[in-house]
Amino acid sequence: MHLPLDVRPRPALALQALTPAALVEAVPEVSLAEARKIIAMVHRGEAVRPTSSVRRAAAEAVAAVGAVPALEVRGVHASAIDPFVKYVLATGDDRVIEAVRIPLERAGRVTACVSSQVGCALACAFCATGKLGLGRNLTAWEIVEQVRAIRRDLPAGTRVHGVVFQGMGEPMANLDAVLAAIAVMTEPCALGIDARAITVSTAGLPHGIRRLAAEAPHVRLGLSIGSARPPVRGSLMPIDRAHPWPEVVAACADHARTTGLAPMWAVTLLDQVNDGDDDARALADAALAFAAATGIRPRLSIIPWNPTGDDRFRRSPPEREQGFRAILAAAGLAHHKRYSGGGDVAAACGQLAARA
């Protein structure tokens, strides 16, 4: 019996999602030196072509199987109150995702906040993305292309200094694509971003945390806590039922021991939900215990809640936030209040919800 041949065309290689080594593996006609030149062409926005250091046969072999697909830019929304800019981007199958350009204190530098999934399955109560459910994982090129879209829109003299995986989706649930994208972001002839300026944030998937440490040891880890009190965390973050707080902290400790990097623990304060003295003391105790076990203190980030259309929550009032922070300070714990900008264009932490 002869089975019919599959004559469907194969999808083109997305060249912006390849490192030089990956290009050589995919197109054996290309040498590693040529691959570096070709990848540099792609990220400069040039067509793949023969040059004095790229043979015609190599350029033609890549052009025959490769392409540089793009995300459709459906909206660019600049905040009127700060320099944050939100990008609304559409995929080829008409899914909508969002990315944010975040200004840094040093002039001429920005951070790209990127999405890793269309929507999110984890349903954290304080996050607008979690209300969407999961559409699908993004591919590596769709993640890389968010950075490229932001980079193309930058003023002269400004560059993308860092990347945070704090947009739509749970990065650890799409870690193959996230790691592939990070490899391109950190490749000198591609995006050339220092791995130490990249943070992957998670709601708490232990296997992914440990894998990130093993495969990208210079990339930083961010952990969304909700609350260091397990019952409160469980009420806000359904992932706690599958991966309870102690299990997540243990994985976070393994990451710190493997990488030597301090994790960032982020808490979004909600009025009369997780902003009480007991919550602050539990966070302080957890951070001190973590430091005792690893020799590394987590970096504590306090985030004001940003409205998501959910009337169950309110932002903690200033006096309660100050009381929470005072308890951390009394325990000798350094912490900072994250400025979460772009709220007027729904670009702030927790607000990304794919509004076309």
Image (cartoon, rainbow, N blue to C red):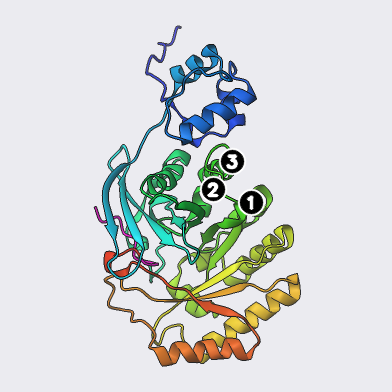
Q: Which residue is identified by label 1?
A: 211
The CA distance from mark 2 to mark 3 is 18 Å
Residue identified by numbered label 3? 187
- Against 150, residue 281 (above or below) is below
Front disc: 1 or 3: 3
How crowded pointer 3 is (Cα within 10 Å; few <14, some 14-19, many 20+) is rated as: many
Where's residue 35, x and y in %?
58, 26
Residue located at (65% from left, 62% from top): 251
Residue 26 visible in the picture: yes
Task: Kindly identify the amino acid type of the residue bearing the numbered disc 1.
Answer: Arg
Query: Between 90 and 203, which is closer to the camera in this rendering?
Result: 90
Q: Which secondary structure lies at badge 1?
A: helix
203 or 74: nearer the eye? 74
Q: Is residue 349 magenta?
A: yes
Above or below, 49 against 194 in this view is above
Residue 95 on image: x %, y %: 30, 45
Q: Which residue is mark 2?
A: 175
Magenta-drawn segment: 348-356
Identify the image quadrant of residue 344: bottom left
Q: Please tell me whether mark 3 sits on a helix, a strand or a loop.
A: loop
Which secondary structure, mark 2? helix
Residue 102: image x %, image y %?
42, 61
Q: Does the stretch in magenta take in 310?
A: no
- Magenta stretch prevailing secondary structure: loop
Say which amino acid is labelled 2: Leu
